[in-house]
Image: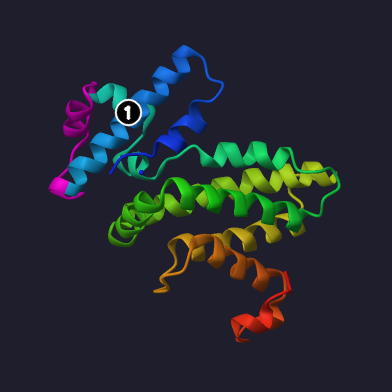
Amino acid sequence: MPSTTTSAPVSGLAVAADGLGLRERKKLRTRHAIREAARRLIDERGYDSTTIEQIAAAAEVSPSTVFRYFPSKEHIVLTDDYANYMMAFLRERPPGEPPLAALRAVVTEMVRRLAEDFSEEYRWRRKLVRQIPAMRALVGESQDSWARSVSELLAERAGLPADNLEIHVLVGAVTGALHQVLWGDHSEDTGLVEMLERAMTVMEHPDTVGRPADATSGTV
């Protein structure tokens, strides 16, 4: 999920590198250098005028190395490692926890980390997603992939078939809410976590739609 970076923040890089061996840390640094270079060049030249070859030269790697890490320029901008971390987080939720409660905990943690680590980059990403059709398409593909993985894992946790309709509907609804928070065409200057709380409140209590914010407090 992208998802899902001026420079990628030290905190996010440190979290990603925690517990990794030397080889994996070097790979992570290369990914970081490529993304840093892409952001800098896109800011200077514009998205359409920035090529993979230019990004590779700025990151001091070959174009083939860039493609080993990222299938396309859109992936350089949007790809992050949070989806994998959130899947691990979901697996660690208490056994028997209702699926919606587990999902709420997972997406809240994802948005909290995004807001802490990537606040500036997130706004940069969001601007590009609104401007570049290929970016919007990749967001949709990434969300579909994430929703499938989450649905299968939740079904497994609940002892249900992987294609259980109710689980897929639930995850699809939460994914839609998350999309509106992260990428929706809203003009509110509200914190991401606060917006997600409101979105999840609507999921759990749809009768609160249209009511003043203070009237919905305590319903979560």
Amino acid under label 1? Phe
**Residue 121: x %, y % from top left:** 35, 49
Q: Which residue is drawn at 54% across and 67% down?
A: 195
Magenta stretch: give its range: 44-62
Is 199 situated above or below 57?
A: below
In this orientation, which residue lies closer to the viewer: 72 or 220? Answer: 220
The residue closer to the viewer here, 200 or 179, is 200
- Above or below: residue 132 compared with residue 195: above
Structural crowding at the residue carrying mark 1, measured as other residues with C-alpha within 10 Å and reported as few (<14), some (14–19) or many (≥20): some
Is residue 3 visible from the viewing direction of this image?
no
Residue at the spot x=77%, y=54% of the render? Answer: 99
Q: Nearer the viewer, residue 80 or 52?
A: 80
Q: How many marks?
A: 1
The answer to whether 45 is drawn above or below residue 218 in the figure is above
Model colouring: rainbow
Residue 56 position in % (x across, y down): 22, 28
As drawn, which residue projects farthest toward the bottom? 211
Q: Can residue 211 be seen in this view?
A: yes
Q: Is mark 1 on a helix, strand or loop?
A: helix
**Residue 108: x percent and y percent?**
61, 54
Decide whether residue 56 is among the magenta residues: yes
Q: Is residue 158 left or right of residue 82?
A: right
Extreme residue in the top direction: 22
Residue for badge 1: 67
Q: Which residue is drawn at 51% across and 32% down?
A: 15
Residue 18, given in percent of the width and then of the height, sits at 54, 25
Residue drawn at x 45%, y 37% as measured from the top left = 11
Q: Is residue 53 magenta?
A: yes
Name the quadrant of the C terminus. Answer: bottom right
